[in-house]
Image (spheres, coloured by chain):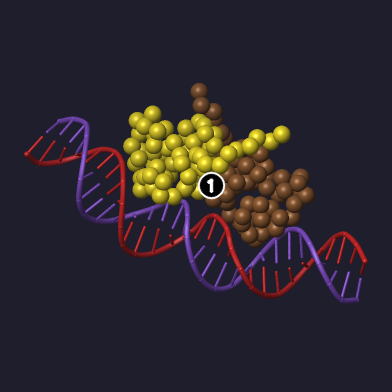
Chain colours: A yellow, B brown, C purple, D red
Amino acid sequence: MHNRLKELRAQHGWSQAALGDQLDISRQSVNAIETGRYDPSLPLAFRIARLFGEPIEAIFDDGEISQAAE
Amino acid sequence: MHNRLKELRAQHGWSQAALGDQLDISRQSVNAIETGRYDPSLPLAFRIARLFGEPIEAIFDDGEISQAAE
DNA sequence: TGTCTAAGTCAAGGTAACTTGACAATTCTA
DNA sequence: TAGAATTGTCAAGTTACCTTGACTTAGACA
């Protein structure tokens, strides 16, 4: 799943390690998510979205077309 | 993490098995998520949100206070 | 009554999401 | 130039997510 983690982290001038500290995960996990080796868990996705002040859907993109309720 | 899966499923009149079919997971997994035994993966959370036409944050709630970007 | 469906749970197993520790390559900078 | 910081990656281990198969309980209904 594509994500904007690297871009958002760069906007704040944080290292992978510094971001990991704030998210309470290791720098290797930050790197793995940024490089697409695996997706974050849902609780971690919530922490990421909250840290950057954006909805999960604005940060992560699973490539499918989202359809609003009618 | 709390979620509204059971409520949303009831609104559509679907069984756990029928919902599992649409999400491409087993009925036991639907039950485990509904009863809070574990959280869905992020890709599965996307499929759930898309199926019900609501944002992930409107269906799942990790209990923390969300703060919009300023 | 017996049968069907739905829901809840358990066991056992596979894969994904994390961990710590290590090493190499690059870049910044004193 | 040497040292520090950053990033990328690997190995090995733990836990979470998800599977199939099975069993139980409860409700609907012929």
- Is residue A40 placed above or below D26 in the rendered structure? above
Residue B59 screen position, x and y as percent:
64, 42
Residue D8 percent coordinates (x, y):
31, 46
Regarding residue B36, the answer to whether it shows in the image is no
Mark 1: which amino acid? Leu
Q: Chain of mark 1?
A: B
Label 1, secondary structure: give it. helix
Check disc 1: other Cα within 10 Å, few if <14, some if 14-19, many if 20+: many
Indicate left or right for B41 with B52 as reference. Answer: left
Residue B67 vs residue A59, the one in the foreground: A59
C2 left or right of C15 in image = right
Q: Is residue B70 shown left or right of residue A15?
A: right
Q: Position of residue B24 (x, y in %)?
A: 61, 55
User: In the picture provided, is D20 more to the left or to the right than D26?
Assistant: left
From this view, report whether residue D15 is shown above or below residue B59.
Answer: below
User: Could you tell me which residue is drawn at 40 percent across and 49 percent down?
Assistant: A37
Tell me which residue sits at (38%, 44%) in the image: A35
Residue B56 in sight here: yes
Q: Quadrant of residue B37?
A: bottom right
Q: Nearer the viewer, residue A22 or D10?
A: D10
Per the image, the residue denoted by label 1 is: B42
- Total number of numbered discs in the rendering: 1
Provide residue B55's location: percent of width, then percent of height.
61, 37
Residue at image coords 33%, 37%: A15
Q: Quadrant of residue D2?
A: top left
**Residue sitting at the far top:** B70
The residue drawn where x is 47% and y is 48% is: A39
